[in-house]
Amino acid sequence: MLAVHLVAFYFSKLQEDPTKKVDRFLYAMRLHDDQLKGISARFQAEIKKGLSSESNAAAAVKMLPTHVRSTPDGKEKGQFLALDLGGSKFKVLQVKVREGMGIRRGGVELEEKTYPIPKELLIGRGTELFDHVSESLKDFMHVKNISLEKKHPLAFTFSFPCEHSSLDQGLLLNWSKNYRVRGLQGKDVVQTLRDSIDRSGDMNVEVLAMVNDTVATMMTCGFDDNFCEVGLIIGTGTNACYMEALCHIDLVEGDEGRMCVNTEWGAFGEDGALNEYITEFDRDVDAASNNPRKQIFEKMISGMYLGELVRLVVLKMAKLGLLFDGRVSDALRTKGKITTAHVAAMEQYKDGLKNTKDILTELDLSPSSDDCVAVQHVSTIVSFRSSNLVAAGLSAILSRIKQNRNLRTLRITVGVDGTVYKTHPQYSKRLHKVVRRLLPECHVRFVLSDSGSSKGAALVTAVAQRLASQRKKVDETLSPFRLNQEQLQLVKARMRAGLETGLKTKGSSAIKMLPSFVYRTPDGTERGKYLALDLGGTNFRALLVNFKKGLQQNTRVYHKIYTIPLEIMQGTGEELFDHIAQCVSDFLDYMGMKKARLPAGFTFSFPCEQTALDTGTLVSWTKGYKATDCEGHDVVNMLREAIKRRNEFDLDIVAVVNDTVGTMMSCAYEDPQCEIGLIAGTGTNVCYMEDVKNIKKTEQKIGKMEREEESPEREENKKDATKGEQKEGDAEIPKMCINTEWGGLGDDGSLDEIITPFDHEVNQNSINPGKQRFEKLTSGMYLGEIVRQVLLDLTRGGLLFRGHVTEALKTPGFFETKYLSQIESDRLALLQVRAILQQLGLDSTCDDSIIVKEVCGVVSRRAAQLCGAGMAAVVDKIRENRGLDHLKITVGVDGALYKLHPHFSRVLQETARVLAPQCHVTFLPSEEGSGKGAALISAVARQKHDQKQ
């Protein structure tokens, strides 16, 4: 009693200022910014906990995936029925969405009817409730003259926590809002509705989507504002949802795109996270509720509890003698006598005090003017705390979105619904002000939902239909790129036939099968210093390779890179080779070896006809070279002449090789089983060791050809490498490396079955229409252009970039192949994909980014599969040449596409393995490239020459 009298005495000193009296009494409800930031940080931690599969079970905030993957973009259309169940009444609606009328242009028409729900159904069986819903739906269709025979899509707003495994499936977790319906918890609500509709009969309705009212609110506002990615309910209950990156949602498979997450934030605090902010009045409200220790955050915020909180505060103050001279009426002691509507009325700007007096009078109280001011202030503090807590939770969500996108500032719209937000005179202003104070770097717009959650549910359905239609069209566009096993087997067969034809045909054939006059691969015994010259693009490389006795790792390589200016590339042949000779002279000066006459290998990465190892007649220029008086001439002789003209040094040019052959030789020095070379870069090609007896096009007879004279070391290496798999005596069969020039496969029409219209466009716009068809499907020079053609087609069809075709997108060569590697990177989030596209002048949405990534993926995957099918043909041919049941062999590989693309190498290897199951193929990336290979060819040739001597 003494404590009570002391409190009464203390506050009696403040009678002259009733608001100060209330401030002191409710100091625990007056939250400052540091406290709000602390609450926000705790809620962010709860978000992370709820999204994780490891901690979700223990999380208070469940973060339920909704399977809503996109917000409206204005292209939605159609007519839908909608049900909205979430309170004491429910609504049935017909929603018409007109295409192209969204994003601030309107275009949704609603007809609705509200049906009461008898109280006995709220505590009855689930089947009884949903039978009532179905009968009301049938009545609505009859009243609105909606055909019962025609099939109608239906959207269902169900404002209770559900666990979704798809958009049209949801298991009820628990009831709220005074619903205590039996037999539904843990069951699929959509299926229950479908069963009820079937029992009702005579309705042809397809339930396409079920959503929470919060999600529906976001979708409603998103139809008119494409920045709306957050939904907020502040009414009888409270909740929030937002668009989360799918890669962060452990409970859903996949990591591409976004999905709306229903936070069910009302449960925040159930684990004690808010204990230090909970007052005695909050505890009393919780204890008297239907769900004690549940929905703690909601009980501090929502309209179901605000009035009761005010009543309990006023009651306590009256008991302490701080109000009404200590008089307490029976009405004031009665739960529910002060409602949230009363709270809103008491805070009216002009009539607030009058309304307060009227409300208190109805409670059989005789308030003084100071009593009215004090009670009004109690209402203000309780409702202000509510808006502050909402601001803290919302700032946590907005901060997460900003962090996910790695942005300094964030522009975003929050769609809001709920009676507290709509009807309370000060609530929205307070909320907006505090959010902007907590997050000054975010530009937040609040949009009030004008048609409630029913329209949103229909829009969810409309979006789902739009995405399904879009998905179908995208799939139809991309399906020709998705090769099945039968098609890949066909490519393998065509490649094998092309290889055989090229070996036999002296005239022209699609696959040239050019003899390289390289008769064997290195055996590790090569020694000495060799010069390597490498010309294959805009750069020229000069290398000095020193093969030392012992391990291959002891090899020393020195090199220098020189630029080939465009005017040299497209000038005269003499100017080009004089420039090369000048570069070689500079390199020899650099190495201090101008006086030495070194053996040299010349890597010349253009199609050449060879009649010996050190002769090569240029067939045609590629890669932008147009130097005159070169085609049809021996490039080795042209280089020798240029060296003579310079008269500063001399070289012994032992070999001219293709870069593919050089790659094979380079890798063979590391692995004696390497007998195949593969280039997968700007261009593509393969070489391999073929039995000389199969090369019918060469005029040399086997008896006149140079045979390998195996050194003891080489013989031993071969035995170790083959491990008994090779037939006895096979090592003595003469072999020669064949430069297949496999990029020409299809020039004879053999690949027409898999050529798409996009490939046709790329071919027609190339500098060599009708040539190198396989290369145009598989190489880095063309993949970006194929992707551009597909993106252009999808954009013209309205499936990308809102149908806006930019000048950049219409420009050939604009989409480089390097972007495929960047966009397809597993480490790259969709936001970064969007950033790449925006750098290219393509203003993309998240959905656009997903499609662009998919286009890049199917184009690059097809390229890798085709190379894999071609490789399967090569290794099977080698296996059959040797009469083996099983072949173990290594492929030396070079090229940026193979080395840098995140998936190309894996898909190529996997395809080769499936199509050539009797071959164990190891792929060895070349470290030093074709330059070292040219030096090795020179070393092998010199070693053979020395052995003959």
Image (cartoon, helix red, strand yellow):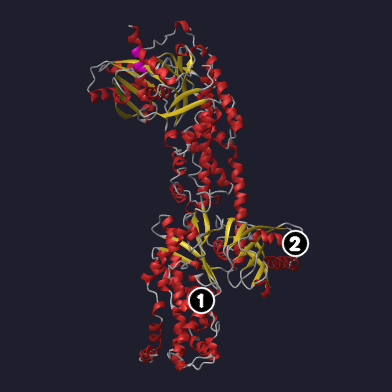
Q: What element carries label 2?
A: helix
Would you say residue 528 is visible in this rendering?
yes
Q: Name the residue under label 2.
A: 199
Magenta residues (range): 937-943
Disc 1 marks a residue whose amino acid type is Ala
Residue 11's tag is: none
- Disc 2 residue type? Arg
Which quadrant of the figure has residue 617?
A: top left
Q: Position of residue 662 (x, y in %)?
A: 39, 23
What kind of secondary structure does the magenta stretch mostly adopt? Answer: helix
Query: Is disc 2 surrounded by few (<14), some (14 to 19) or many (20+) residues within 10 Å?
Result: few
Q: Nearer the viewer, residue 487 or 262?
A: 262
Residue 424 visible to an observer of this rendering: no
* Residue indicated by mark 1: 287
| Mark 1 vs mark 2, CA separation in Å | 41 Å
Q: Is residue 6 above or below residue 70?
A: below
Whether 931 is among the magenta residues is no
* Residue 560: x %, y % from top left: 29, 28
Q: In this view, does 654 lie above or below 538?
A: above
* Quadrant location, the N terminus: bottom left
Tags 1 and 2 touching, CB below 8 Å:
no
The correct choice, above or below, for 197 with respect to 375 in the image is above
Q: Where does the image place residue 217, in percent across and percent down from the top left?
A: 56, 65
Task: Give the quadrant of the C terminus.
Answer: top left
Residue 320 quadrant: bottom left
Q: Would you place residue 826 above or below residue 887 in this image?
A: below
Closer to the camera, 445 or 424?
Answer: 424
| Earlier-in-chain disc, 1 versus 2 | 2
